[in-house]
Image (spheres, rainbow, N blue to C red):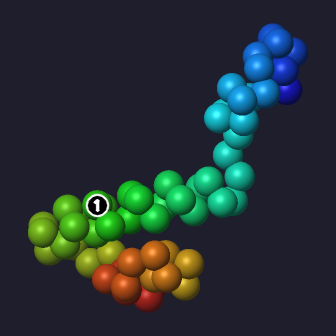
Amino acid sequence: MLARKNKMTEPLVDRLLLNENRIRKIAEEAFPVICDRLSAKGVEIRGDKAARQIDERIAWA
């Protein structure tokens, strides 16, 4: 709302918005990197069904 109040263009406002789809895309890019780095250190990664759908190396929490 503040962005619109400050007369930012709609494309700029759109870039600021986080919705479920955008958050999932961020997770899909980040989880493999996180798993790689933690696995290299011997850390077990645990998560829920949604996390396991993104990376199968994530164990059930």
Q: Vertical placement of 9 versus 18: above or below? A: above
Badge 1: residue crowd in 10 Å (few <14, some 14–19, many ≥20): few
Judged left or right of residue 47, residue 36 is left
46 to 8, vertically: above or below: below
* Residue at 19% from the left image edge and 72% from the top image edge: 39
Residue farthest top in this picture? 6
> Disc 1 designates what residue?
33
Residue 55 x, y percent position in the rendering: 39, 78
Please indicate whether residue 60 sits to the left or right of residue 35 in the image.
right
Quadrant (top left, top right, bottom left, bottom right) of the N terminus: top right
Task: Residue at 59% x, 56% y: name it.
Answer: 23
Q: Residue at x 38, y 65 (%)?
A: 31
The residue at 53%/59% (across/down) is: 25
Q: Position of residue 36 (x, y in %)?
A: 22, 67
* Residue 22 x, y percent position in the rendering: 62, 54
Q: Nearer the viewer, residue 25 or 9?
A: 9
Q: Position of residue 37 (x, y in %)?
A: 20, 62
Identify which residue, 10 or 39, lies in the foreground.
10
Is residue 48 something one can see in this rendering?
no
Where 39 sits versus 52, above or below? above
Q: Is residue 17 left or right of residue 35?
A: right
Residue 15 visible in the displayed image:
yes
Residue at disc 1, secondary structure: helix
Residue type highlighted by circle 1: Val
Number of numbered discs: 1
